[in-house]
Image (cartoon, coloured by chain):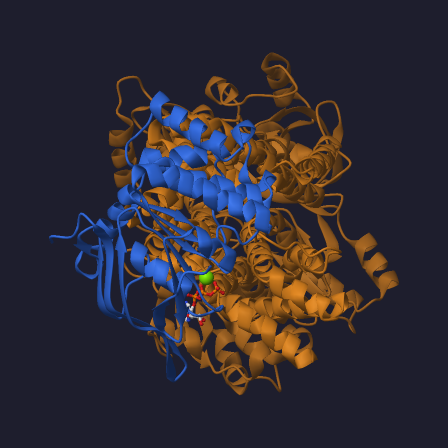
């Protein structure tokens, strides 16, 4: 594929439906999307419109019912579950909407975890984890268990973790849902700061329209379709 | 609205069908084991009791004597003195129907009661046998009376032996083979007659005297005295010294008392199974409450009262209990059928001859089990129900997080456990408490140690975490910490499993200790090379005698260097039945005894000389008598006091023995019989060859058992193993319940961890790695449970060996703890946990991460 270099995620006629009793709910109904390397994309839309579903499909956590999804040159529907998992482990970073950190590992260990998965252990891994934790302003909390952190602090650790293993694409689902506008903005700026220089791609789902202003592109999900929004003033 | 509350709750519950099925199964298994054991024990006892009662008829008292029996003239005298009194002479013995080769006939080698009666006297005592009763009996009366050697049997017996009227039956009565002719086949009328005639050979008194060799003597005289105490007093006073009058009910009660300890021991084991079932209910209910925390919180904010929620949860538990118990009762009747054979065999080996083949569904036992099952369920659900209605419903993470592990409940529970352990120790230490108290103590001990499970689990998990981290990396650490993080769940699983496994260890160590003590005792006490005994049909004691002619011949046979004689007999002490034995003393026999409270050199000279006895440990324990004290025995010369010289270890019978020297016995009893002989082979003579030679020298009509020391030892051990076969079955059930407990706990864990696993999968952990993670964790669970089971099991073994055996049987055993069974248990524990973890591991690895990541 000639444009793998530039397009890291490509969706073509992607469909996703859920059965609900006798009827089916078309959550995504023929979605096309190209995301370029290094791009910062914001996705918003009404609740229940399918934003989380879209991220799940891109990450291979869930499979589409129709169409094709290419991520970093691999067609997700055509590779095995294990291959999808390994792709996720090595190339993707994830910040979830709800439940983020492993409660039985300390903050530091949560940051070491994705690195260990890709075989990076030892002092290098620790120093990288410490550096990231420092960047999100929680250097002092290395040995704390997640349940001792506030919602916003947990979300910041999750962001650091999403970057720990140096992924190519970071998918973030409402990482700022628990935060006030001011903190939300600084979290997103932080994400950008960490990703931009390394030409990493960021897909951010948010209700906060103000954050759209920081993005290269803003998409809106509604009625199963994806629409590009004009850039605000 | 209340319908909707229930509906909402039920829907939430319905999502966890597996969980519910497992806990219903757990209760069912627990109840089933209890029901099975109780029914089997009661059925085998009941068969014996009913037929004895039916045979007793209207008799309230009996006049009996020692081995020699009651003189026949006494009956005639009494009949003259009290013409209005209903009384009847009885000669009773056990008999075996055999073929020409001496092999027992009939299903299950039935032992028959040979009952010799006088039909004219019977009419008033046992009307079912006389006029107006079964017609067949009356028709055959004259023949029966006039012709010696004839007998009556029931139609059922005739069928089972495949004989008809007019046939000749070959019997073994005592050590003789005899023949009787079947002169009539009785079709009993009514259930009472059916019971009484079951396995009965009815003969005339004279015929019975001939068959048993009790010439001119009766086994007893049955009387119907109603509650005329004054008359009883008068009759009693008029009797010669060698006989006495006692209540018929006492004989029966004695036997029930004997089996009491055995049945109690079995019941204790079955309760362990129920306890594990209770853990399961607790687990399920806690789980179902935890899962519905947010639902409950929502309901509460909508204004549903706490009482209402409590009722919903309690009703659910009740339903689980009802369904599980119903299933358990049914399953229990099935188990009872399996166990009946084993239990009856033990009863036959040790206590009395019975041939029970059907399980009787005793209403009381069933009701008690139902109450127990439902009660246990409700108790198991109480804590979760209270938690559900607690002041502040906890929101947020449904799993108990690490925080709760630091909570004080662990310490509080451990404290409670310590209190229970202390109470248990007090119950064991204070001799004032009896057998039942020891069982309560055992239960308290198990629960008490179980209360330490959370604390122990936390300790172990903290020790495991760095080790597992080194081996498996972050996964290992995660797995170990997960055990601590979900403590409320994992510790229940661990406690349940540890309790079940510890029962196995406890029983195992007890049986090993028992066996090794028993073997040591057998080696010590079997002093002869060859034993000759008259075969007996009465379990536990030997009363048939060897013809004096053969005693003479056997003891002087070539190759025999020396011998000692043994005479088992029955008598009474202060109205209670006592097993006695008269023994001849020589150097070999002296060496076969070990005294716990006296020195052998002091005992033997006095034992031979004076009116003295030695008693077995269990007798001493029961009667609370020991060296230096006196015991009164009914002898042929009236009641006599004997000095106790010492107490010796003995495992031959649990009621114990009083031993007299042959000379002392001869002074106080008329009987001169010998029930067995111990022969010493001359040096260089092979015992087996001697056995063969002696057997060949005996005529065919003598049914004497000639066995070598070794074969006696082997068959004793066989009986020993048979006695404990029941516990093997119970252990299987206990372990099965434990496995179900672990599975149930793991499935609960699985659901609680669904989101966490989903996140791991989203982060790039492969399904295989998830499976490994779950297995690593369950393996650790198994290890912790196994480790906890060791002290718990050894504590139980200590109690069983040092307290319970002492209190139930009066036996002191040497504790024997081998490392190997303990290690096996540890391995078994890990293996069982891994096995139980396979299903959840597979399910968790397969779970779709997208679903798990959705907030709820
Ligand atoms: N496993 C599922 N089964 C049935 N329906 C589902 C499932 N997952 C999602 N849905 C439905 O798909 C729709 C889109 O869900 P999704 O979680 O993607 O919404 P969202 O845009 O992320 O909403 P929010 O902003 O509230 O997070 C919703 O209507 C939801 O009910
Ligand atoms: Mg969403």
Where is residue B270 shown, x and y percent of the image?
A: 55, 52
Q: Which of the 4 image quadrants contains residue B220?
A: bottom right
Q: Name the outermost residue toward the left.
A: A2
Q: Name the outermost residue toward the front.
A: A233
Q: Give the answer, above or below, for where A66 lies relative to B549.
A: below
Find chain B in the image and tell me its colour. Answer: orange
Where is residue A181 shown, x and y percent of the image?
A: 58, 51
Q: Residue at x 63, y 22 (%)?
A: B607
The residue lying toward the viewer, choosing from B215 and B435, is B435
The residue lying toward the viewer, choosing from B556 and B430, is B430
Q: Residue A65 vs residue B337: left or right?
A: left
**Residue B566 visible within the image:** no
Q: Residue at x 52, y 47 (%)?
A: A185
Q: Residue B602 vs residue A223: left or right?
A: right
Letter of the chain in blue: A
Q: Residue B87 vs residue B129: left or right?
A: right
Q: Which of the 4 image quadrants contains residue B469?
A: top left
Where is residue B705 shown, x and y percent of the image?
A: 36, 42
Q: Give the answer, above or below, for where B557 lies relative to A201.
A: above
Q: Which quarter of the rendered picture does the N terminus of chain B lie within?
A: bottom right
The residue lying toward the viewer, choosing from B674 and B542, is B542
Q: Residue at x 52, y 66 (%)?
A: B328
**Residue B473 visible within the image:** yes
Q: Name the outermost residue toward the right.
A: B230
The residue lying toward the viewer, choosing from B479 and B658, is B479
Q: How many marks?
A: 0
Q: Give the answer, above or below, for where B799 lies relative to A231.
A: above
Please tell me in which quarter of the rendered image ligand 1 is found: bottom left
Where is residue B242 shown, x and y percent of the image?
A: 70, 46
Q: Residue at x 41, y 63 (%)?
A: A51
């Amino acid at each position: 594929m000639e444009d793998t270099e530039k397009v890291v995620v490509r969706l073509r006629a992607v469909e996703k439906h859920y059965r609900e009793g006798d009827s089916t709910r078309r959550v995504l109904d023929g979605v096309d999307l190209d995301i370029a390397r290094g791009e910062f994309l914001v996705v918003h839309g009404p609740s229940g419109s399918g934003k989380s579903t879209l991220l799940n499909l891109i990450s291979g956590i869930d499979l589409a019912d129709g169409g094709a999804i290419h991520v970093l040159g691999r067609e997700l529907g055509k590779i095995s579950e294990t291959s999808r998992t390994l792709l996720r482990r090595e190339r993707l970073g994830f910040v979830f909407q709800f439940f983020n950190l492993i409660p039985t590992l300390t903050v530091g260990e949560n940051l070491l975890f994705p690195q260990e998965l890709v075989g990076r252990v030892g002092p290098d891994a620790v120093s990288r984890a410490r550096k990231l934790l420092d960047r999100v302003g929680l250097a002092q909390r290395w040995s704390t268990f997640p349940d001792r952190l506030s919602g916003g602090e947990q979300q910041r650790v999750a962001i650091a973790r999403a970057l720990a293993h140096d992924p190519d694409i970071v998918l973030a689902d409402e990482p700022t849902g628990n935060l006030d506008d001011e903190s939300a903005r600084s979290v997103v700026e932080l994400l950008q700061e960490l990703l931009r220089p390394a030409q990493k791609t960021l897909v951010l789902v948010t209700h906060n329209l103000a954050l759209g202003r920081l993005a290269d592109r803003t998409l809106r999900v509604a009625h199963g379709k994806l629409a590009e929004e004009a850039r605000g003033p | 609205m209340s319908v909707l509350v229930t509906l909402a709750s039920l829907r939430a519950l319905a999502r966890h069908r597996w969980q519910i099925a497992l806990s219903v199964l757990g209760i069912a298994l627990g109840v089933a084991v209890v029901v099975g054991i109780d029914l089997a024990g009661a059925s085998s006892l009941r068969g014996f009791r009913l037929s004895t009662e039916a045979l007793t008829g209207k008799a309230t008292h009996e006049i009996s004597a020692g081995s020699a029996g009651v003189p026949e003239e006494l009956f005639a005298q009494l009949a003259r003195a009290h013409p209005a009194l209903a009384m009847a002479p009885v000669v009773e013995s056990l008999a075996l129907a055999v073929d020409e080769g001496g092999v027992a006939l009939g299903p299950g080698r039935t032992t028959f009661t040979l009952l010799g009666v006088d039909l004219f006297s019977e009419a008033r005592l046992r009307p079912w046998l006389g006029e107006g009763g079964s017609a067949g009996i009356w028709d055959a009366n004259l023949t029966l009376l006039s012709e010696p050697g004839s007998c009556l049997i029931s139609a059922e017996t005739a069928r089972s032996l495949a004989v008809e009227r007019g046939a000749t039956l070959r019997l073994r009565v005592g050590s003789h083979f005899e023949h009787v002719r079947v002169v009539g086949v009785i079709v009993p009328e009514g259930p009472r007659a059916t019971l009484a005639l079951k396995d009965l050979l009815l003969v005339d008194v004279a015929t019975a005297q001939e068959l048993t060799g009790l010439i001119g003597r009766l086994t007893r005289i049955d009387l119907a005295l109603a509650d005329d105490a004054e008359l009883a007093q008068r009759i009693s006073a008029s009797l010669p010294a060698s006989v006495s009058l006692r209540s018929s009910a006492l004989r029966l009660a004695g036997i029930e008392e004997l089996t009491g300890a055995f049945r109690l021991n079995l019941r204790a084991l079955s309760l362990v199974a129920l306890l594990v079932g209770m853990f399961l209910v607790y687990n399920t209910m806690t789980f179902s409450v935890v899962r519905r925390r947010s639902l409950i919180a929502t309901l509460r904010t909508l204004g549903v009262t706490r009482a209402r929620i409590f009722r919903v949860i309690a009703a659910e538990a009740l339903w689980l209990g009802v369904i599980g118990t119903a299933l358990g009762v049914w399953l229990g009747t099935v188990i009872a059928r399996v166990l009946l054979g084993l239990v009856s065999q033990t009863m036959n080996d040790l206590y009395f001859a019975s041939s029970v083949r059907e399980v009787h569904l005793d209403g009381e036992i069933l009701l008690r089990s139902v109450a127990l099952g439902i009660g246990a369920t409700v108790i198991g659900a109480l804590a979760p129900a209270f938690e559900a209605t607690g002041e502040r419903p906890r929101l947020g993470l449904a799993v108990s997080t690490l925080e709760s592990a630091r909570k004080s409940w662990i310490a509080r529970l451990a404290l409670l456990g310590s209190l229970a352990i202390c109470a248990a120790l007090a119950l064991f230490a204070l001799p004032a408490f009896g057998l039942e108290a020891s069982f309560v103590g055992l239960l308290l001990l198990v629960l008490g140690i179980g209360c330490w499970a959370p604390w122990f689990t936390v300790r172990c998990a903290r020790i495991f975490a760095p080790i597992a981290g080194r081996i498996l990396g972050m996964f290992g650490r995660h797995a170990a910490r997960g055990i601590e993080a979900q403590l409320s769940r994992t510790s229940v699983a661990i406690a349940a499993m540890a309790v079940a496994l510890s029962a196995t260890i406890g029983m195992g160590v007890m049986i090993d200790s028992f066996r090794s003590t028993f073997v040591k005792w057998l080696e010590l006490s079997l002093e002869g090379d060859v034993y000759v005994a008259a075969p007996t049909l009465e379990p536990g004691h030997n009363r048939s005698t060897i013809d004096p002619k053969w005693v003479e011949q056997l003891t002087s046979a070539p190759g025999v260097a020396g011998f000692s004689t043994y005479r088992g007999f029955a008598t009474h002490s202060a109205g209670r039945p006592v097993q006695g034995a008269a023994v001849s003393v020589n150097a070999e026999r002296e060496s076969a005894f070990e005294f716990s409270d006296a020195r052998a050199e002091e005992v033997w000279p006095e034992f031979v000389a004076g009116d003295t006895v030695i008693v077995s440990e269990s007798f001493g324990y029961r009667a609370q008598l020991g060296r230096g004290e006196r015991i009164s025995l009914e002898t042929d010369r009236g009641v006599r006091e004997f000095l106790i010289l010492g107490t010796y270890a003995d495992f031959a019978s649990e009621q114990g023995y009083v031993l007299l020297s042959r000379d002392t016995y001869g002074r106080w009893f008329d009987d001169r019989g010998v029930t067995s002989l111990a022969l010493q082979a001359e040096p260089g003579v092979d015992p087996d060859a001697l056995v063969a030679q002696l057997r060949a020298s005996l005529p065919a009509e003598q049914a004497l058992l000639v066995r070598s020391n070794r074969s006696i030892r082997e068959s004793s051990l066989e009986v020993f193993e048979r006695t404990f076969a029941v516990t093997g079955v119970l252990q299987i059930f206990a372990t099965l319940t434990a496995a179900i407990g672990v599975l149930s706990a793991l499935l609960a864990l699985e659901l609680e961890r669904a989101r966490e696993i989903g996140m791991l999968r989203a982060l790039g952990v492969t399904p295989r790695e998830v499976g490994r993670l779950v297995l690593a964790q369950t393996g650790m669970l198994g290890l912790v449970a196994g480790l906890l089971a060791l002290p718990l099991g050894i504590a139980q073994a200590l109690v069983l060996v040092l307290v319970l055996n002492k209190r139930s049987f009066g036996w002191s055993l040497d504790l024997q703890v081998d490392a190997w069974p303990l290690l096996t248990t540890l391995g078994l524990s890990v293996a069982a946990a891994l096995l139980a973890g396979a299903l959840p591991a597979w399910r968790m690895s397969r779970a779709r991460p997208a679903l798990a990541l959705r907030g709820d």
